[in-house]
């Protein structure tokens, strides 16, 4: 059996991801307080809903920072993969919390449709406009790092959706200011809630799929099988498993049946290089099987031979 434990440069990813996360977290936290107070003072559900969405962004960014720090901790005898899965758990928690926030907003909006309260539209537009600028700032600084992990991508999507939520809040303010349509505020709040739920739907199921050790979506299991079986000297493969340890860190284990007695180390190296080069699979465990390994000197007892059957 051969194992190759070449990991992605997590330390480098940490340095590249930490600063934009800290900046986004600080700006979102400050403006969450501003927007929540403004929503309570103006009695705007759209603004309170947007503040709730911003709170989810604050939580998502804070948990992402925590997960980012913990993924740098070395593996131990009890946690042989370290804390890489923590970022997946954080992404799942963030998504489920967002679903809860969306459900609460929809429930509150349902009550306001029947009797929409009076809302101070001008402060609503001012605060929502400032929130839009803060959200766009976070979108811009997280954009380059969005593909580095599931957590960073979820944080980026949260801020992007929150930007659209601010636009909805501004639209509610305009509708109230020019037309007196107070019902437009719960309508905008409902639109934000739906945006929250559907925007995180894929994230939640992707995190759950990783925790269930599903095959990464960008890898075709049968193509990997055909590629291995097409290598010279390989008769067949079985017990092929491919899964994600965390974002961008994939693992493979497989049993390879040989056609002949080729050099074991050479073939193992060839297969590892093939998997890394073609599929980006650098954490591999390959077990070789075949006639060349049924050596009587290694396994003196063989129940299929006449001598061993008589003893």
Image: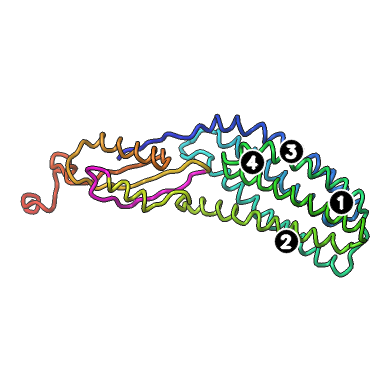
Residue 197 position by quadrant: bottom right
Give SS at disc 3. Answer: helix
Q: Above or below — where is 38 with respect to 19?
A: below
Q: Which mark is residue 64?
A: 4
Name which of mark 3 and mark 1 comes first in the sequence: 1
User: Between marks 3 and 1, how big is the CA–CA gap?
Assistant: 21 Å
Report the residue marked by disc 3.
Answer: 137
Q: Is residue 67 left or right of residue 241?
A: right
Mainly helix, strand or loop, the magenta region?
Answer: strand
Question: In front: mark 3 or mark 2?
Answer: 3
Residue 179 is situated, as x and y percent measured from the top left of the image, at 92, 60
The residue identified by callout 1 is 39
Label 4 – label 1 distance at C-alpha: 27 Å
Query: Horizontally, is 248 left or right of 165 in the view?
Result: left
Query: What is the spatial separation of the Cα atoms under label 3 and label 2, in whole angstroms?
Result: 27 Å
Q: Residue 103 has which mark?
A: 2
> In the rendered structure, are the residues bearing label 4 and label 1 in contact, judged by CB atoms less than 8 Å apart?
no
In the image, what residue occupies the spot 45% across and 43% down?
250
Tag 4 secondary structure: helix
Q: Nearer the viewer, mark 4 or mark 3?
A: 3
Would you say residue 47 is visible in this rendering? Answer: no
The first of marks 4 and 3 along the sequence is 4
Instruction: Say which residue appears at 19% left-offset and 42% top-offset.
Output: 293
């Amino acid at each position: 059996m051969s194992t190759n434990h070449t990991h992605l440069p997590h330390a480098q990813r940490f340095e590249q991801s930490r600063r934009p996360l800290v900046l986004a977290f600080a700006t979102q936290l400050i403006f969450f307080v501003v927007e929540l107070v403004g929503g309570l003072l103006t009695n705007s559900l759209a603004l309170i809903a947007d503040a709730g969405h911003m709170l989810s962004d604050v939580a998502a960014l804070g948990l992402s920072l925590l997960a980012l720090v913990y993924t740098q901790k070395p593996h131990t005898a009890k946690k042989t993969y370290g804390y890489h899965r923590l970022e997946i758990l954080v992404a799942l928690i963030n998504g489920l919390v967002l679903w809860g926030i969306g459900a609460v907003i929809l429930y509150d909006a349902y009550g306001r449709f029947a009797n929409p309260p009076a809302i101070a539209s001008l402060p609503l537009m001012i605060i929502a406009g400032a929130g839009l600028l803060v959200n766009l700032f976070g979108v811009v600084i997280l954009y380059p790092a969005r593909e580095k992990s599931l957590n960073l991508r979820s944080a980026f999507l949260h801020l992007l959706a929150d930007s659209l939520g601010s636009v909805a809040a501004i639209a509610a303010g305009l509708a109230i200011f020019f037309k007196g349509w107070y019902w437009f505020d719960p309508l905008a709040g409902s639109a934000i809630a739906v945006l929250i739920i559907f925007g995180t739907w894929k994230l939640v199921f992707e995190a759950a799929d990783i925790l269930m050790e599903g095959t990464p979506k960008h890898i075709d299991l049968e193509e990997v099988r055909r590629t291995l079986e097409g290598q010279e000297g390989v008769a067949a493969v079985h017990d092929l498993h491919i899964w994600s340890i965390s974002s961008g860190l994939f693992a493979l284990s497989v049993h390879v049946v040989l056609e002949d007695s080729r050099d074991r180390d050479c073939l193992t190296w060839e297969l590892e290089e093939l998997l890394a080069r073609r599929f980006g699979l650098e954490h591999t465990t390959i077990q070789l099987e075949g006639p060349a390994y049924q050596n009587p000197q290694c396994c003196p007892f063989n129940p299929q031979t006449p001598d061993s059957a008589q003893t």
